[in-house]
Amino acid sequence: EVQLVESGGGLVQPGGSLRLSCAASGFTFSSFWMHWVRQVPGKGLVWVSRINMDGSSTGYADSVKGRFTISRDNAKNTLYLQMNSLRAEDTAVYYCQRSLDYWGQGTLVTVSS
Amino acid sequence: EIVLTQSPGTLSLSPGERATLSCRASQSVSSNFLAWYQQKPGQAPRLLIYGASSRATGIPDNFSGSGSGTDFTLTISRLEPEDFAVYYCQQYGSPPNTFGQGTKVEIK
């Protein structure tokens, strides 16, 4: 069974940093592109970042470019999102997504003083 | 960036009725790389359709996708009680991937 389990969310002050993790199981992690997508509670989905299978190519939404870094450890079957210089508008539930088809349950990031 | 506009914002229908949801792109979606997702409160989205018209694994055949270029449609032929939810389209043909703002299908 494919499983994606996010962790690392929480409350952080503006300007702070947080690293999200997404532990993958039930499939060959190194064979899939992975994405991070976020959603402000009650609002729509917003694509954040993507990474290719071996980690050599990444992409970011303009709103996070230069502040967020996506990476992966295929030996540990884990996807990461390093979030720096966090702003109030980064407050959201962050989902990891396998290609198109599987999503984790999300982890809530709250940026507030 | 490709902007996706979904309409209507809310669709009020009764169980058994047909639902037609629209997703219009600001420019042509490369290779018709357009997906549809369903999201229920407190849950992660679920992939319904990819490549504009291919049903994802386990998705019942009362869900169908159509369209090409800039105009796409998700049709639910006969609404079941569990189909009342929010639906999003997403294009993944031209980076950055973008989502529409969603259509809520509610019980009339």
Image (spheres, rainbow, N blue to C red):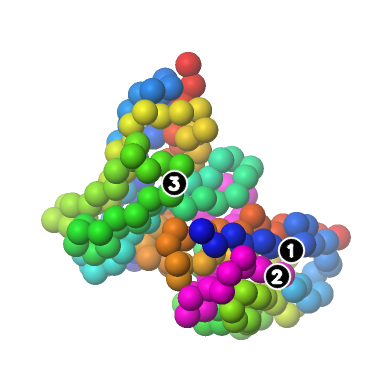
Q: Position of residue A51 (x, y in %)?
A: 30, 57
The magenta segment is B21-45
- Residue A96 placement, left or right of A82: right
Mark 3 lies on a secondary structure that is loop
The residue closer to the viewer here, A95 or A61, is A61
CA separation in Å, label 3 and label 1? 25 Å
Q: Could you tell me which residue is drawn at 34 percent across and 54 percent down?
A: A59
Q: Which residue is mark 3?
A: A62
Assess disc 3: are there few (<14), some (14-19) or many (≥20) residues with their C-alpha within 10 Å of its C-alpha: few
Badge 2 amino acid: Ser
Q: Which mark is residue B22?
A: 2
Query: Who's the residue at 59% across and 79% down the image?
Result: B69
Residue at image position (53%, 73%) is B29
Spatial separation of the CA atoms under disc 2 and disc 1: 5 Å
Q: Position of residue A80 (x, y in %)?
A: 28, 46
Instruction: Tell me where residue B84 sits by quadrant.
Output: bottom right
The earlier-in-sequence mark between 2 and 1 is 1
